[in-house]
Image (cartoon, coloured by chain):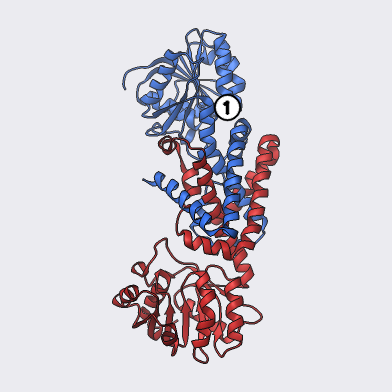
Chain colours: A red, B blue
C-alpha cells in the first residue's frame, strides 16, 4: 500500500499510540497534514518536536474541523464521552475511528451519534503498545506486524469500513474483522482474564506474609511467568474492567469452574487430573508452534 | 568444599536428578563409588556409559548394602513406599536422603522408620531440574546456584542434618533450612498454585471453543506468560497435588478470595481496584530486582 489515503488527519490524544500513529502516517506519507489535539501543551509541543504532528491545539472543535480522518487515541471512557462532541464538530463525510481496547460500548455510542450526522464511525483496536506511557516512547513501527480489530455491525457503513481497514493495513497490520461483542469476548479471554488472574495470584501469595527474601530465593519460572504481567497501568485496567464487566465475568466463571475441577481431581481422581493436564498441554502447545 | 564426603553412594532412581547428582559427585570427586539402582537395565546401562555410576543393579537390597549415603531420586509416592525397605537394608550409620518435591509425608515416614533403625534420615528438596525427563539429559552442574531445602524437625539427627547440608553445598547449592510443613506451604505458594492456575486458565479458554487460529493471531504476552507452564509431566503433578493437598487447598482458597475481591472491585469500586493493582505491582516488583 502506498500513496496518500487522507488529506488532513486529526489525532485526539497524542500519547504512545496516537504519537506512533502520527509518526507512521508521516513517515509513510499516507496523509497531508496531521493535527494533534490534547490537554497538555507541553506534550503536544513534544509531539511536534518529534515530527509526529504538524499542528497542535488543545481545542477539539478547531482541531478536527477540517479533518477527513479523526482517530481518537485516548482511554476507553474518554473515547465514549468525547464521541458526541467529535461527531458534532466533524465535517461532512469525515471518517472517525479510535483505538479503544474494549469495543461494545464505544461502537454502540459511536454508531449511534454518527447515525444522526454526516460523519462515519468505525471502531478499531490495534493490538499494539508497550508498557510505556507517553509520546516520548512513540515509534512509527509500533503497529507493524500486529493484529488490528476493525468492528463491523449491521449499522456499519461499508465504504467507511473499507477505508479504516486500508488505514491499518497501510501500517502493516493484519486486520481481524469482528462484531464488537465478539471482540470483547476474545480480549477478555486472552488478555483481561489472564491479567486479573495474575494480579490475584500475586495478592494471594502476598497475603500469606511469608519472608519475601526467602520466597525470592526459591521462586522458579512458575511464579515468575504467571505473575510477570501483574503490574502496569492500574488506571487503564480500571477502565477495561469497568467497560468489559460482562465478558470478564463470563470468563471468570469459566475459570473458577476449571480450577475447581482440577483441585477436585487432584485430591480424588488421578485419571481425571491426567486428562485435564493433557488437555491443557495440548491446547497450549498450539500457540508455541 | 573439597575432598571426599562419602565412600559408597547409592542413588535410587537414575533419571535426570539422580543422574545429575551422580555425575556431579563423580566430577567433584566427592565420593568413592556410585551405585545406581533402578528398574530398567537399559537406563542403568546408559547412566553407566555416561560415567554417572560405577555399578548398576535392579536389586535394592544389594545396591544399598554397603552405602554410607543413599539418595532416593524417584517420584514422591515411590519415595514414601520404598523408605521402609531402604531403611531395612541400609547398613548401620548410613545416611538416607531424597529429592522429593513435597516434604511433610516423606519426612514423617522417613523419620519414623529411621527411628527404629541404626540409619539416619534427613529430607531434601533441591530446587533444580528442567522439563526434560531421563538420564540422557543429566548434567553435573544441574544443581549449581539453585536452592536446596533441607528439613529439620525435633526428630532430626543433627550430625546427619549437617552432612546432608554439606552434600548439597558441595554441589554449589544454597541451603534453605525448613520444617517440612513450612516447605510444603512455600512450594504450594510459589510453584503448585501458579501451576494449577495456569492449567485452569488454559482449560477455561479452551472451553470457549473459539477459533484457535484467530486466538493465536491476537494473543500477546498476557496469555503467553500466564500459560507458559501449563504443560509438563502430568504424572509428577498428580503426585505433587495428591501429596500436598492441604497446602494447595489453603492457597487455592486464598487465591479465590483475591480474585473475587478484584472482580468485585472491577465492577463497582474503582478506588479499591487501584489499591489491589498497586499492591500486586509493588509486591511483584520485589522479585525483579
Q: How many marks?
A: 1
Residue A250 position by quadrant: bottom right
Query: Residue A253: x percent and y percent?
Result: 66, 53
How many residues crowd around disc 1 within 10 Å: few (fewer than 14), some, or many (20 or more)?
A: few
Query: Residue B11: x percent and y percent?
Result: 49, 22
As drawn, B131 above or below A103: above
Query: Residue B72: x percent and y percent?
Result: 52, 23
Q: Which residue is mark 1?
A: B40
Q: Chain of mark 1?
A: B
Side of A76 where A16 appears, left or right: left
Camera-side residue of B283 and B160? B283
Q: Quadrant of the C terminus of chain B?
A: top left
Identified at 45% across, 78% down, the residue is A170
Of all residues, the one furthest to the bottom in this rendering is A92
Q: Is residue B59 visible?
A: no
Residue B232 position by quadrant: top right
Identified at 48% across, 37% down, the residue is A209
Query: Residue A265: x percent and y percent?
Result: 68, 39
Identified at 55% across, 29% down, the residue is B102
Side of A54 where B98 appears, left or right: right
Camera-side residue of B255 and A178? B255
User: Callout 1: helix, strand or loop?
Assistant: loop
Residue A271 position by quadrant: top right
As drawn, A288 above or below A53: above
Q: Quadrant of the N terminus of chain B?
A: top left
Of all residues, the one furthest to the left in this rendering is A49
Q: Is residue A273 visible?
A: yes
As drawn, B24 above or below B83: below
Amino acid at each position: 500500500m502506498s500513496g496518500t489515503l487522507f488529506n488532513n488527519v486529526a489525532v485526539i490524544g497524542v500519547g504512545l499510540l496516537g504519537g506512533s500513529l502520527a509518526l507512521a502516517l508521516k513517515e509513510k506519507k499516507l496523509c497531508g497534514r496531521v493535527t494533534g489535539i490534547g490537554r497538555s501543551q507541553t506534550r503536544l509541543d513534544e509531539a511536534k518536536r518529534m515530527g509526529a504532528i504538524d499542528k497542535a491545539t488543545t481545542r477539539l472543535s478547531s482541531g478536527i474541523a477540517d479533518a477527513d480522518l479523526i482517530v481518537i487515541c485516548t482511554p476507553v471512557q474518554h473515547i465514549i464521552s468525547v464521541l458526541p462532541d467529535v461527531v458534532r464538530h466533524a465535517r461532512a463525510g469525515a471518517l472517525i475511528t479510535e483505538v479503544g481496547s474494549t469495543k461494545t460500548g464505544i461502537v454502540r455510542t459511536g454508531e449511534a451519534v454518527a447515525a444522526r450526522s454526516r460523519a462515519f464511525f468505525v471502531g478499531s483496536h490495534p493490538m499494539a503498545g508497550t508498557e510505556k506511557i507517553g509520546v516520548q516512547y512513540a515509534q512509527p513501527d509500533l503497529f507493524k506486524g500486529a493484529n488490528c480489530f476493525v468492528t463491523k455491525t449491521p449499522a456499519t457503513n461499508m465504504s467507511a469500513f473499507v477505508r479504516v481497514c486500508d488505514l491499518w493495513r497501510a501500517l502493516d497490520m493484519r486486520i481481524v474483522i469482528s462484531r464488537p461483542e465478539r471482540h470483547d469476548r476474545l480480549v477478555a479471554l486472552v488478555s483481561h482474564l489472564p491479567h486479573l488472574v495474575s494480579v490475584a495470584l500475586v495478592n494471594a501469595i502476598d497475603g500469606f506474609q511469608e519472608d519475601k527474601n526467602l520466597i525470592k530465593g526459591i521462586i522458579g519460572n512458575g511464579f515468575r511467568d504467571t505473575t510477570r504481567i501483574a503490574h502496569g497501568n492500574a488506571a487503564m485496567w480500571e477502565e477495561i474492567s469497568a467497560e468489559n464487566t460482562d465478558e470478564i465475568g463470563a470468563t471468570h466463571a469459566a475459570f473458577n469452574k476449571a480450577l475447581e475441577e482440577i483441585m477436585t481431581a487432584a485430591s480424588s481422581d488421578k485419571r481425571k487430573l491426567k486428562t485435564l493436564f493433557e488437555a491443557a498441554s495440548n491446547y497450549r502447545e498450539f500457540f508455541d508452534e
